[in-house]
Image: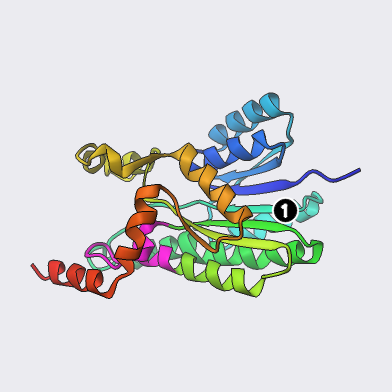
Amino acid sequence: MTRKRTALITGASAGLGEEFARQLAAQGINLVLVARRRDRLQALAAELAQAHGCTTLVEVADLSDPAAPDALYNSLSAQGIEIDYLVNNAGIAGSDLLQDRDWADHQAFFQLMMLSVAQLCHLFIPAMRERGFGRVINVASVAGRIPRDGGCNYGPSKAYLIALSEDLAVTLQGSGVQVCALCPGYTHTDFHRTAGLQDMKDGMPGFLWYGADVVVREGLQAVERGKPVYLSGRLYRWLDPLLQSVFTRRLFRMAARH
């Protein structure tokens, strides 16, 4: 009997993580849902198990804790659970590198946004390669594609995920394991509200925003097609070559001076 695939999704209690869970469950894939909020995870797990007949497991973890990735891996190993899909989605807006003076906050941010992702890849990808199948989506951002005047944390952390994903994709080519850095632009989730950015969102034109369902659907299609980096949303795919231009980057630097 063929074993059903299992997906591990971090940040699964809301936003893109929740949408990844919904779309993967609809494909008949079993789920390991990871986040800090047990009640939200349990409600989602029960709903998806009933709707799609998939097995759903809740693992409460705070990935800003350096011990969390190992604890998660050890828990799943003890239960004999093999991971076929790894969706590294957990994230926050972060603090301002220069203005916020508590270095411990920055360390926790780096642990969550970069180190935990690298460690989960380190822990789970080798077994995928041995089995000859794996799909890894690292949720990055358009913000990782262009330097900006701002907090100097969020964009650089996403740039790391893009570079990591590209290297992994090259390294794993031909192994059956495919890695994609999914780069959404502005997306309708609760991210901006929880980050205190709702007023900014309300003041922006609607054509810049895409639904979470679109972002996730395109991300799952992109990793299946072997795309190491994928810009979600037609507008952002059109804009990306412009953003990568040396002339555009020069304009960004000039604008930051004024």
Query: How crowded is the residue under tag 1: few (<14 C-alpha within 10 Å), some, or many (20+)?
Result: many
At a point 66% along the width and 36% down the height, the residue shown is 25
Q: Quick check: is 144 in the magenta stretch? A: yes
Q: Quick check: is 201 in the magenta stretch? A: no
Considering the image in quadrants, where does the N terminus appear? Answer: top right
At a point 29% along the width and 71% down the height, the residue shown is 245
Between 80 and 171, the one lying in front of the other is: 171
Residue 169: horizontal and vertical position, in percent? 60, 68
- Point out the stretch of residues depicted in magenta: 141-159
Instruction: Tell me if I can see residue 16 in this picture.
Output: yes
Q: According to the image, label 1 marks what residue?
A: 83
Q: Give above or below for 223 relative to 48.
A: below
Instruction: Tell me if I can see residue 11 in this picture.
Output: no
Q: Give above or below for 235 relative to 258.
A: above
Residue 56: horizontal and vertical position, in percent? 70, 37
- Horizontal side of 144 relative to 203 (left or right) equals right
SS of the residue under disc 1: loop
Residue 195: horizontal and vertical position, in percent? 32, 45
Residue 44: horizontal and vertical position, in percent? 59, 31
Most extreme residue toward the right is 1
Between 148 and 106, the one lying in front of the other is: 148
Q: Quadrant of residue 73?
A: bottom right
**What amino acid type should be assigned to the residue bearing mark 1?**
Ile
At a point 37% along the width and 67% down the height, the residue shown is 156
- Horizontal side of 63 relative to 242 (left or right) equals right
- Horizontal side of 145 relative to 89 (left or right) equals left
